[in-house]
Amino acid sequence: MSAKNLLVELFVEELPPKALKKLGESFAAVLADSLKAQGLAPADAVVTPFASPRRLAVHLSAVAAKAADRALQQKLMPVAVALDAAGQPTPALLKKLAAVGADASAVAQLKRAMDGKAEALFLDSVVPGATLAQGLQKALDETLAKLPIPKVMSYQLADGWTDVKFVRPAHRLVALHGADVVPVTALGLEAGRTTLGHRFEARSATIELTDADAYATQLREQGAVIASFDERRAEIQRQLQAAAAPLGLQPIDAPELLDEVTALVEQPQVLSCQFEPEFLAVPQECLILTMKANQKYFPLLDAQGKLTHRFLVVSNIRPADASAVIQGNERVVRPRLADAKFFFDQDRKKTLAERVPGLAKVVYHGKLGTQGERTERVRAIAHAIVNLLRMATVPYTVDAKDEFEVLDSKVQQAALLAKADLLTDMVGEFPELQGIMGAYYARHEGLRDGVAIAIEDHYKPRFAGDALPRNHTGTVVALADKLETLVGLFGIGQLPTGDKDPFALRRHALGVIRILVEKNLPLDLPALIQAALPAFGELITDPGEALLTFFADRLAVSLRDQGYSAQEVDAVLGLNPVRLGDVPRRLEAVRSFAALPEAASLAAANKRVANILKKIEGTLPTAIDAALLKEPAEQALAAAIEQVQPQADALFEQHDYAGSLKALAQLKAPVDAFFDGVMVNADDAALRANRQALLNRLHAAMNRVADLARLAA
């Protein structure tokens, strides 16, 4: 029988919108993979997922009615065990044959072949291919078991006795192979060809699907449903742009909101609404968040990115007169905006400084005390960071009028007030606004703008790709805040495990890394960790070693994600650089060096040198006696090092890492000649030690920028 296209749909009650996209993708992918694995669908079969608020479905091309039979060779047992001295089958062989569904008559068809050092018996058989009904039943069972269901609910079937557990109650199952129904079951349902369309807009109560290929068309035309999640999302996006364009405005860019709204509607219609302009006196972040989070509306922004009093609604119905829908949404949003205005007005009646004592009543962690105690630790760490910047060997320049004493004053004020907005009504309602609201309230009180910015920015970067703190004060407080979290939690043994990271320590570590690297701060990571320890007193044990390893792992992952090769990353991080701001320049230098014609030979030689030095017991020899340089090749290498090393070191000290490595490329010829003509492990102990000292100096000279041995293939 020729292959036909397959359609499987599970019709359910409204699915959780935030999970719908993943549920739809998983339903299609797992079911298709299972059919492919069973030989019922080709590897290149086209998989089309569908997901709407009330359905999960998949269309799969070229599915066979029956999988092809396949040959199977089974090893039974060694000949010495299977046959007796007369060549007759032993009871053990007969028992094995029975276990695999054969009898004594199969003995004559058994094949002998070597299996390792012994000869064994093998049984050739043909395994019948699965029918589509069998294979699809297996695929459905696997698919439902593997769905990423956020929360399972239990419900009873129509018989009143049978319990079923699923994400939502399921009511219909469709399975069509071409125009034929495939007899499978799932969740107490038997497959058919009937489905339902839109609750209110469908042309008929039920839809009889003619065949698998008609699914999307029939749902659209008869059921008023755009079944494809991606098509529905694209249609909503198109309508949003079309509705905003005549107003000269732009919908807010919110991919997660767009996904959620796509999961809430089956036949979208975008409508334009508005609210009273006086609400715009409230910070726009508050209004945007309440419209997005509570109402699933799309706020409209002007060309400067400023919120306007207009917003867009995605309706699930298309009435001839949409005025009632528009008015209803405008009426619903007003109380939400009024609440935001009330919170904003009430919060401003009390200063941030007046709220600080209240942090002593907010528990941060059972072993680390309250938010008030945490605030004092952040202030102490921030003060230590300012001192490290003041004493940096590479001068750290602050604004012309912003000396370190002034910077420390600002840092202390910002760190003191940074967590105060946690006690405001607005942040209590919208935790996502912490820091942002603190900045608004700080400006309202007339605090220095630099302090207000630092209060907002001390959480940055909040996520991958987020902006960094904008000023010196925010940079210091952000580092202090993240270090307090990392040092404190590592210090009490609260480390991330697997995919569990309840305190977002990986994100905090990446935040520290990004600040140090992208702002090129002259701060050593180990010194930063040690500077944070005194703030904790006896609360924690020193987590320095574990924390440095954690940072190294996060940095390596981040660099590989940025496109650097594993070899490049290993070469640079193999030296455990303490100043992370140097890492990008070192990586670029290594990449430039690797492109030189001398690179491969020098990397291999460097690896050879490292292996020789590793085998030396005790202290490595360092003193080179010129009188013991007997061979011309070792004399030439020593002379080359004397000439090249000062050049490379001078460039290194100027942070010209690429230039430093390029200078070292001059050593290729003398290094090659040395290994071709000199025996390092000479019988004479003095000669041997002198040559080892020469290699030790070579190794030290070549590995200041990176561990070049790790570039060797």
Image (cartoon, helix red, strand yellow):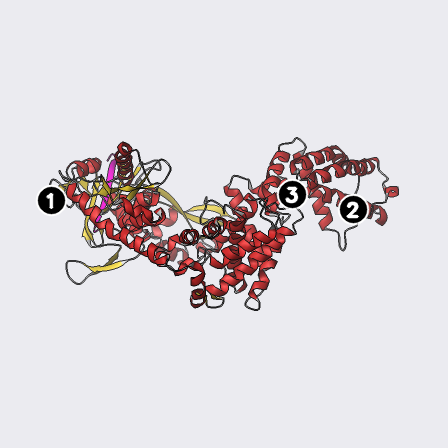
> Which of the labelled discs sits on residue 502, or is there none?
none
Residue 525 left/right relative to 344: right
Whichever of callouts 1 and 3 sits on the residue coming sooner in the sequence is 1
Q: Amino acid at mark 2?
A: Gln
Marks 2,1: beta carbons within 8 A: no
Residue 546 left/right relative to 317: right
Q: Amino acid at mark 1?
A: Ala
> Which of the labelled discs sits on residue 205, or is there none?
1
Residue 622 left/right relative to 97: right
Q: Dot 1, how many residues are within 10 Å of its Cα: few (below 14), some (14-19), or many (20+)?
A: some
**Residue 424 image-quadrant placement:** bottom left
Where does the image place residue 471, in percent across and percent down from the top left? 52, 46
**Nearest to the observer: residue 661 or residue 674:** 661
Callout in the foreground (3, 2): 3
> Which of the labelled discs sits on residue 692, or is there none?
2
On the rendered image, what quadrant is the N terminus found in? top left
Please state the extent of the stretch shown in magenta in the rendering. 1-13
Magenta stretch: residue 480 in it?
no
On the rendered image, what quadrant is the C terminus found in? top right
- The CA distance from mark 1 to mark 3 is 71 Å
**Residue 618 image-quadrant placement:** bottom right
Is residue 178 positioned above or below 506 on the image?
above
- The CA distance from mark 2 to mark 1 is 89 Å
Whichever of callouts 3 and 2 sits on the residue coming sooner in the sequence is 2
> On the image, numbered disc 3 is attached to which residue?
706
Q: Secondary structure at mark 3?
A: loop
- The CA distance from mark 3 to mark 2 is 21 Å
